[in-house]
Image: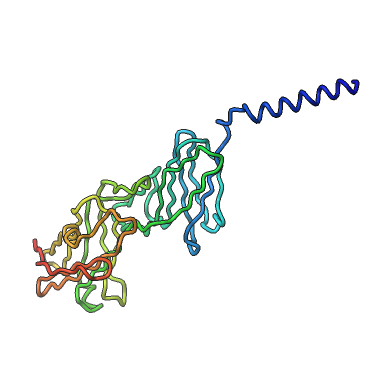
Amino acid sequence: MTKMHIKTALLLLLAGTVSCSVKEDRTPCPCYLQISFTDPEASGTVILQGQGAAASFREQLRVEECRPYWSRAVGKGSLMFSACKGIHASAVEGSRVKIPVGRQADSLYAFFAQVDATGDFAPVPVTLHKQFATVFLDLRKTTGELTDYEFSVTGRTSGTDLQGFAPLSGPFRFEPVAREGEDILSFRIPRQAGDDLSLSIRSGDAEPSLFPLGELIRDTGYRWETEDLQDIYVSIDLTRGKVLVVTGDWENGMNLPVVDT
């Protein structure tokens, strides 16, 4: 091949390269998610899920693997992304976290966002939010006296949808037991859809005392729509027939009559 032919071939190759970089259809090129955690002290195992027309994935990894960020290639488009940690007894079915009947809510922390993954890169800073409330129940009894009682909590919210945190409809039942050496009973409940939560307390062969726990919580002004759910404190004086329900910092307590069966 002559020098002239070589020069011509190089010019044609260069022209073709320039043409490709200008006119190339980049739609098939992926977008790289860059997932990071805003809390520098966050740790433990997380589940990351993405769902969109061009991408679908589910990964389980350690938060430590996301320092400074964890990257994944996905098809370009809009992506429903969620992250969660703290799942132990619950079952994950797609984006739904379901609590088995007979178990309390897990200590679920979660994040959700609709991600614009149409560019080459999509940073996703993750802030996990508290999706459960711990109810602390005080019967004003000693540790020994508390073991004489049986407790049952029932409701019609059985979990959480990670895509937006809507409560899932379904039966909820848990029978908390006082821990040895403690005079306060505690149990976890998920973000609620209504006010149907009920608490039953029985001593021996006596008829149980029923408390409309969901309604009592509602009457404090508690909001189930907040990003991070506050804990709930319930004090019951069975002798005097008084109930005190307090949320957050104990500022919104009230005295209410006991509701008996």
Does residue 88 appear anywhere in the picture? no
Q: Quadrant of residue 103?
A: bottom left
How is the rendered protein coloured?
rainbow
Count of marks placed on residues = 0
Q: Nearer the viewer, residue 44 or 222?
A: 222
In this rendering, the answer to whether 139 lies above or below 135 is below
Q: Nearer the viewer, residue 241 or 118?
A: 118
In this rendering, the answer to whether 159 lies above or below 203 is above
| Residue 223 locus on image (x, y percent) | 25, 57
* Quadrant in which the N terminus appears: top right
Does residue 158 appear anywhere in the picture? yes
| Residue at 55 percent of width and 43 percent of height | 121
| Residue 123 locus on image (x, y percent) | 51, 48
| Residue at 11 percent of width and 75 percent of height | 239
Q: Is residue 133 left or right of residue 47?
A: left
| Residue 180 locus on image (x, y percent) | 31, 74
Q: Quadrant of residue 11?
A: top right
Q: Is residue 151 left or right of residue 58?
A: left
Q: Nearer the viewer, residue 189 or 143?
A: 189
| Residue 42 locus on image (x, y percent) | 48, 61
Q: Is residue 39 left or right of residue 190?
A: right
Q: Nearer the viewer, residue 18 or 224?
A: 18
| Residue at 22 percent of width and 68 percent of height | 246
* Quadrant in which the C terminus appears: bottom left
